[in-house]
Amino acid sequence: METKQTSFQRLSMSDLSNPSTLSEDLSISLAGSNIHIFTLPELKVITQNFAASNFLGEGGFGPVHKGFIDDKLRPGLKAQPVAVKFLDLDGSQGHREWLAEVIFLGQLRHPHLVKLIGYCCEEEHRVLVYEYMPRGSLENQLFRRYSVSLPWSARTKIALGAAKGLAFLHESEKPVIYRDFKASNILLDSNLVEWARPLLNDPRKLSRIMDPRLEGQYSETGAQKAAALAYQCLSHRPKHRPSMSIVVSILDPLKDFEDIPIGTFVYTVPAENLKENVSKEGETRKGSDEE
């Protein structure tokens, strides 16, 4: 860990401002960090020449493909699935963002930060190789039309893990402020923040902003504490917002709350049976009236 901290002090964006020596400077500065420098031909092998069948998605950075590293590719690199992110030179993000990811993820290691395995810097090509996350993004889990609803316990653990990752970044010897925290990486839309704020602070109205797909299967106490925390985090006054360490300390107990109601059994009567019963009931009433 001491080696990584020393490297972090030594390496910054300004240290790598010369494009002509960038590749050499990176390899020297990240020596000993277990970051691999891949060649473009190697990445083509890993992704089967960036095959369409391996395409995972595309964001502001560029297209992402799934790949597989064979243990015979190079010594010291174990066989594993990976995600290969190729910088789109015409995209919304550019070389500086790519460089920032190499610098910070190349020098920082934490269980709640995605692991950077390596990179490629050949001519105009800028590529990042990450550990593969088989369940995709939180955005997909929450909002994809046919995704299975995440249970309350999973949501609290995800929130806690994200908070721990941010706390690690914020409280490093040289703090890192992550400005792209969203639900493809977990972002609350600004409009959502405004209409949700008053509801977060009122336990009686909290149910209005709970995900209906949970169908009431969540800890009411935990939800109230999470909402109160979110309300503090959304304060217009930065000094009133809790640090990520405080966020972690508040979220940590939530995963163990057990006041989750047992789902009620609901029997749905088929429409044809309902019509038949109504018809019979009408006939019975008619017979009673005639008597």
Image: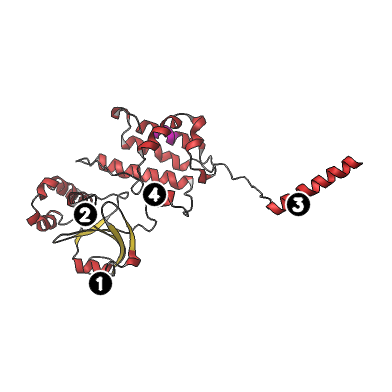
First reached walking from the N terminus: tag 4 or tag 2: 2
First reached walking from the N terminus: tag 3 or tag 1: 1
Which mark is in front, 3 or 1? 3
Instruction: Find disc 3 in the rendering and name its residue.
Output: 276
- The answer to if 106 sits in the magenta stretch is no
Q: Position of residue 233 (x, y in %)?
A: 35, 33
Residue type beneath disc 4: Glu
Which mark is in front, 4 or 3? 3
Instruction: Check the image and report above or below for 115 versus 235.
Output: below
Instruction: Find disc 1 in the rendering and name its residue.
Output: 72
Q: Are marks 4 and 2 in contact (CB under 8 Å)?
A: no
Q: CA distance from mark 4 to mark 3?
A: 45 Å
Instruction: Find disc 4 in the rendering and name its residue.
Output: 139
Segment tinted magenta in the rendering: 225-230
Residue 74 visible somewhere in the drawing: no
With 290 as the anchor, is 152 left or right in this view?
A: left
Q: Position of residue 166 (x, y in %)?
A: 30, 42
Residue 177 visible somewhere in the drawing: yes
Label disc, if present, on residue 90 of the rendered structure: 2
Residue occupying image coordinates x 30% and y 50%: 113
At numbered mark 2, what does the secondary structure look like: helix, strand or loop?
Answer: loop
At numbered mark 3, what does the secondary structure look like: helix, strand or loop?
Answer: helix
Which mark is in front, 4 or 2? 2
Q: Are marks 2 and 3 in contact (CB under 8 Å)?
A: no
Residue type beneath disc 3: Glu
First reached walking from the N terminus: tag 2 or tag 1: 1
Q: Position of residue 232 (x, y in %)?
A: 37, 31
